[in-house]
Image (cartoon, grey):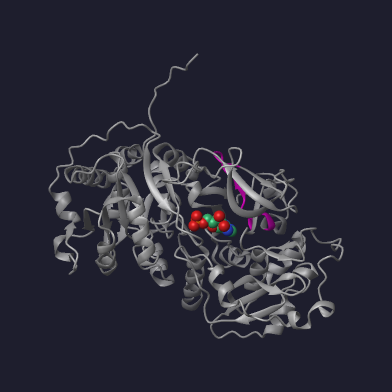
Amino acid sequence: MLGQMMDVPLLVSSLIAHAARHHGSTQIVSRRIEGDVHRYTYRECEARSKQLAQALVALGVEPGERIGTLAWNGYRHLEAYFGVAGFGAVCHTVNPRLFPEQIAWIVNHAEDRYVLFDTTFAALVDTLAPQCPEVRGWIALCDEAHLPTMRTPVLCYETLLAAQDGQFEWPLLDERSASGLCYTSGTTGNPKGALYTHRSAVLHAYGASMPDAMGFSACDAILPVVPMFHVNAWGVPHAAPLAGTKLVLPGKDLDGKSLYELMEAEGVTCSAGVPTVWLGLLAYMRGAGVKFSTLKRTVIGGSACPPAMLRTYEDDYGVQVIHAWGMTEMSPLGTLSKLNWAQSQRPLEAQRALLEKQGRVIFGVDMKIVGDDGRELPWDGVAFGDLYVRGPWVIERYFKQESGSPLVDGWFPTGDVATIDPDGFLQITDRSKDVIKSGGEWISSIELENIAVAHPAIAEAACIACVHPRWTERPLIVAVKKPGADVTREELLAYFQGKVVKWWLPDDVVFVDELPHTATGKLQKLKLREQFRNHVLPSALEAGDQCPLDPHEPPDANKGAAGSATDSTKSAAMRG
Ligand code: AMP
C-alpha cells in the first residue's frame, strides 16, 4: 500500500526558492575580484539565478548539458549553482588550480557547452580555448566595464543577465537527474567525474546542516574557505540557503589576514576549510596578536587535521574544531568529530583523543572496514583496513564509465585505510597508496605527521615510505620549520621516542623550505616520493643486522597492536 503524502521531488532549485521566500532578507556578502565587497540577499540571489537560467536557455543550452565554471567563492558563482542546475543543466565546477592540460581534458571530457569564468582566469581561458573547440562560449563573470582584454571572444555575464526579466518558473525535474559534476584530482591517471543528482545534493544539504554535522542555523554567518570548485564547497552553498544562514564568500584572497579581517567585519560564526588554510590563519593571528570576536566553530577536513592545530584553536582562540572526513565521491561529507552526551562526560583528555579522530558517520552514510581477505574487521580502534561506504549521496559509478561500477557488493571502496573504535569513531591512518609497509606491517604516515607537527619548531610535515633493503619500506619525515624556529634532525627524531611503538619510529628527517600540495591543498606525496626516490636512509646503510628496529618484536603491552600509542601517551604527545 502506497502512502498518501505529496510526491515533491528534492530539487536544488527548492533550496534557493526556500531561502528567497523565508529568509529573503538574509545577506550574501562577497569579496569581489573587482576589489570591493558586494552585498545582497537570498531574494536577489534567486532572482538573478532565474535570469541566468533564462540567459542560458536563450543561448540554446538544453537540460542535461554541462556548464563549466572556473571561479572563486562569490555571488555570481553561487548564482551558477542554482541558475544552471535549476533549469535542468549540470553545473560543472572546474578546479582552476589544476594544470591547463588537465583542465582542458576535464572540460572536453565533460563536454561543457559554456564556461563561466572569473576574470582572474582570463589568461587561463586564452590557453584553454584553442584546446576546447566544443565549448560554444566563454562567459566572463563581470560587467562590461571589467571585461578583460583577451584573445578569446567572450560573452559578458552581466549583459546576458540584464537582457532577461527573471520571469521564470523553476521546472519540476526528476529528482534523480544530474545537478552537478565535479572531477577528482586524479593524482594517478585521468581525473574521474562524480555526477551528483538533485536528490543527492538536497539530502546531503540536510545531512550537512544537522547539529552533529556542520550545524547550520539561521543564527549563523558562515564563511566557506573551502572553494566552491572543490566538491561544492562541502555542500555549504546548498546547506546555507536550506537553513537561512548568512553567507560570506571570500573571493580569491585566502591568506590569513584577508580571512581574519572578513570574518571580523561580517560577524562570521562558523567556517570550513582544509588544514593548510587554518595554518595560514593561525600564523597571521599569532603574528598580529589578535583573537576572534565572533568565530565559534570551524570544520576542518580534506586532509588530516593535526591534533596540535585542533588544540591551539580551542585553547588559545576559543574556536571549536570539528574534524571531518569525506571525498568527492561522497558529495563529500562522511564523518564528523562530535561527541555524544556520554562521551562529553569523560575526562577532558579522553574527549580530545576522540575529537582528534575523523569522527562518526552522519545519517545517510554507512561505513565498514575490511581486511585483505575481504572480511569486515572489528570496531576496536586497533584493527585497520580498507574503508568502504554507502548511502544516498555516495557515488554509484563515475561519469561516462557506464560499464564498470567501482562498487563491491554495493559498497564504495574509498581507497582510505582506517580504524573504527568502539565509539564508532573513524580514524583515517592513510590513503592506501601512501601507507608505509615495513616488514609486511603497516605504519600510519598520518600518525607520524601529527607527532612531527606537534613539535614547537615544525610548521608542516609529510611522512613517506623510503626503500629499505631489509624492511622494504621505512618512514622518512620531510619537514618544514616554523619561521625563526630551529630543531635538528636528531632532536626531531628523539621527539618521537615513547610516542609510538619502536618499529614505527621514523628512520630519518629531511628539512625542506616547502612541501608540495595538490590543487586541493593536500600533501602531494607522490611527488615527494619521486623527489626522495634515491634518498638513502642511514638505517639502510647499516642494513640488515644492525637495523635498530625489529618489526617482529612483540607489541608493547601498553601500546595498540597496530602500533599507535595509547590515548594517554598520545594525548601527552600532542600537547608538545
Ligand atoms: P577529495 O575527493 O579530493 O576531497 O579527497 C578525498 C580524500 O581526502 C579522502 O579519501 C582522504 O584520503 C582525504 N581526506 C579527506 N578528509 C580527510 C581527513 N579529515 N583526514 C584524513 N584524510 C582526509
Vertical side of 122 occupied by 372: above or below:
above
Q: Quadrant of residue 427?
A: bottom right
Please name the residue shown 66% across and 75% down the image.
476
Vertical side of 254 occupied by 114: above or below:
above
Q: Position of residue 195 (x, y in %)?
A: 42, 45
Judge whether residue 357 is colored magenta: yes
* Left or right: 236 in relation to 570: left
Q: Position of residue 64 (x, y in %)?
A: 31, 40
Can residue 300 be seen at all in this image of the molecule?
no
Magenta span: 353-366
Please name the residue shown 38% across and 56% down the image.
229
Q: Quadrant of ligand 1?
A: bottom right
Q: Quadrant of residue 173?
A: top left
Q: Residue furthest left?
A: 163
Vertical side of 21 occupied by 245: above or below:
below
Can residue 166 be seen at all in this image of the molecule?
yes
Which one is nearer the viewer's eye here, 40 or 379? Answer: 379
Q: Position of residue 541 (x, y in %)?
A: 75, 83
* Left or right: 254 in relation to 333: left
Q: Residue furthest front?
A: 403
Q: Position of residue 273 (x, y in %)?
A: 48, 60
Q: Quadrant of residue 366?
A: top right
* Left or right: 213 in relation to 56: right
Which quadrant is the C terminus positioned in? Answer: bottom right
Which one is nearer the viewer's eye here, 300 or 77? Answer: 77
Judge whether residue 116 is colored magenta: no
